[in-house]
């Protein structure tokens, strides 16, 4: 059945890229349809429970078969689907990329040919806009690598928790320059519930909607202004007529009914895994002179959590304390044994979510471990990873899900440099925690796709980049990509704010063609 309405734009996916593309389009008076595979995340006190951690919620779905191949290991990968995407469950860290991130050095680029088609100054006004919309709280001038900005942060952050002051003192004793993380969290009220400083911010949806995720601060207003958001709608493919996409085919996840939607432009915002999956399963790479890179150059940061164990609970008051960052090694550590050049950043985190631990350990072992969690706090290492063509997604048409989508196989391994950069950052995490009083520490590598980017990269050379400088899919007149897939390199900070700013820029540039 074909929807009889014709939309100016159809956006596939309601995560942060889809939300900010929709924002620019609705502001311009466009008729916009957003198709979301998942549903709204219910907000209630249940979000605070261990069962409210993201991987235990209905948003985490194994319905479509994804398989991750790392070395000789094979493991299933679940999809993640809900209104607002990962912004609902993420910890709200909202960094701009540094100016130097748009001109990545040889030690990162290697032989990948990665090249940003625009610079920081081109994105700066859209960063300003995205920060205003998300109400980012931060302290201007503290971060030693902070890029140029035309305005201060929209909000001031909450006071430092006692534990954060302890971590900051240890870092300063080591000659480092800790600073306040920019957070998309509501501290100033403004007619909404303000943050109460709970310990279930990262990996949980906010029970009182004080976290400024896009399902809270973007979509309600856009829907009131006429945006159409269809939930539980699985996009199965795109229909072409010449060099234009004319219809988006979808399946109702609950009833199995098939529908087609017509639109003037199509924006892919399904995420770094689902967007190339849909492009490849629709055969759109065949239209693109750079189609050979679709699905390739998967980047996911080389991350690790280092947890310090203390004799006594380091956070007895139970205060929120994901507050600090360290960027002294962002562009290198000339005094250390680390690889030459860019390394990455360190961010303060809280104890691991009880729900995630229980899923991995089981209830009996979790009961033994749980008392220890009160004596733990942590630091996150984010090492910038190298773009490599061998890190890729490909489809196997032998197995399909009930919606007709083919199986996707993910092949990924970190380079020796990626791992060495992470080790260098982890060693600094251990030193900071030790200086703060930790008796010993444990490091756990992160294997999620929460920071994944790449796979449909933008660039200058049409033969080695699938998107042009405006994130238009080469070879097709009216298809754009506005999620993290567009990034040619990963930088070494959380990608969400850059995805938002780029989506605003891409949609704005598309609208300029109509003038």
Image (spheres, rainbow, N blue to C red):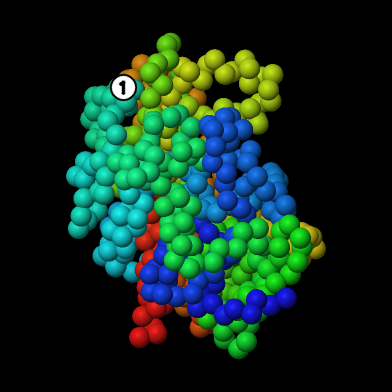
The residue wearing badge 1 is 162
- Quadrant (top left/top right/bottom left/bottom right) for the N terminus: bottom right
Nearer to the camera, 223 or 335 = 223
> Can the viewer see residue 185?
no
Nearer to the camera, 34 or 142 = 34
- Quadrant (top left/top right/bottom left/bottom right) for the C terminus: bottom left
Query: Which residue is at a point 37% across and 61% down the rendered structure image?
Result: 501
Q: Which x, y percent locates residue 354?
A: 57, 27
Specify whether 183 is left or right of 263. left
Q: Which x, y percent locates residue 55?
A: 61, 40
> Of helix, strand and loop, which one carries label 1?
helix
> Can the viewer see residue 437?
yes
Query: Which residue is at a point 24% across and 35% down the rendered structure image?
Result: 177
Specify whether 233 is left or right of 131. right
Query: Which residue is at a point 55% across and 54% down the rendered structure image?
Result: 83
For residue 99, above or below residue 471: above
Question: In terms of image quadrants, where is residue 114?
Answer: bottom left
Query: Which residue is at a point 46% across and 17% down the rendered structure image?
Result: 375
Question: In terms of image quadrants, where is residue 339?
Answer: top left
Specify whether 282 is left or right of 419. right
Q: Which x, y percent locates residue 175?
A: 23, 30
Nearer to the camera, 1 or 202 = 1
- Toward the bottom, the furthest residue is 242
Q: Which x, y percent locates residue 469?
A: 39, 73
């Amino acid at each position: 059945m074909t929807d009889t309405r014709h939309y100016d734009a159809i956006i596939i996916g309601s995560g942060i890229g889809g939300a900010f593309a929709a924002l620019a389009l609705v502001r311009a008076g466009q008729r916009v349809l957003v198709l979301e595979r998942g549903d709204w995340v219910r907000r209630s006190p249940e979000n605070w429970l261990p069962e409210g951690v993201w991987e235990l919620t209905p948003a985490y779905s194994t319905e479509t078969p994804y398989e991750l191949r790392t070395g000789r290991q094979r493991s299933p990968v679940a999809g993640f689907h809900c209104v607002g995407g990962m912004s609902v469950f993420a910890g709200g860290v909202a960094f701009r990329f540094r100016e130097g991130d748009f001109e990545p050095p040889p030690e990162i680029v290697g032989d990948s040919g990665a090249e940003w088609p625009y610079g920081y100054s081109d994105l700066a006004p859209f960063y300003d806009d995205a920060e205003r919309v998300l109400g980012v709280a931060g302290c201007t001038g503290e971060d030693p690598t902070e890029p140029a900005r035309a305005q201060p942060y929209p909000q001031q952050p909450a006071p430092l928790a006692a534990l954060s002051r302890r971590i900051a003192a240890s870092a300063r004793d080591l000659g480092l320059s800790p600073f306040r993380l920019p957070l998309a969290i509501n501290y100033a009220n403004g007619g909404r519930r303000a943050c109460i400083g709970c310990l279930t911010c990262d990996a949980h949806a906010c029970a009182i909607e004080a976290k400024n995720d896009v399902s809270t601060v973007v979509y309600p207003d856009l829907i009131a202004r006429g945006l159409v958001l269809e939930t539980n709608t699985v996009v199965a493919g795109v229909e072409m007529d010449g060099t234009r996409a004319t219809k988006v085919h979808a399946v109702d996840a609950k009833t199995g009914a098939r529908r087609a939607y017509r639109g003037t432009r199509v924006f892919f915002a399904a995420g770094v895994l689902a967007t190339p999956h849909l492009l490849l399963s629709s055969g759109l790479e065949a239209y693109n002179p750079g189609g050979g890179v679709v699905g390739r150059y998967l980047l996911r940061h080389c991350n690790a959590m280092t947890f310090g164990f203390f004799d006594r609970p380091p956070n007895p008051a139970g205060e929120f304390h994901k507050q600090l960052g360290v960027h002294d090694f962002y562009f290198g550590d000339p005094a250390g044994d680390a690889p030459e050049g860019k390394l990455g950043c360190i961010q303060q985190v809280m104890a691991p979510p009880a729900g995630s631990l229980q899923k991995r350990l089981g209830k009996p072992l979790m009961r033994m471990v749980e008392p220890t969690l009160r004596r733990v706090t942590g630091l996150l290492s984010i090492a910038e990873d190298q773009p490599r063509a061998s890190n890729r997604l490909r489809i196997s048409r032998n197995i399909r899900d009930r919606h007709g989508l083919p199986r996707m196989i993910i092949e990924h391994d970190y380079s020796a440099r990626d791992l060495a950069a992470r080790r260098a950052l982890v060693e600094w995490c251990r030193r900071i925690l030790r200086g703060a009083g930790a008796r010993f520490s444990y490091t756990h590598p992160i294997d999620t796709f929460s920071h994944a980017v790449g796979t449909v990269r933008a660039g200058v050379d049409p033969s080695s980049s699938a998107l042009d400088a405006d994130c238009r899919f080469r070879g097709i007149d009216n298809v754009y990509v506005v999620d993290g897939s567009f990034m040619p390199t990963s930088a070494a900070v959380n990608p969400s704010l850059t995805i938002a700013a780029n989506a605003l820029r891409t949609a704005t540039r598309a609208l300029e063609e109509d003038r």
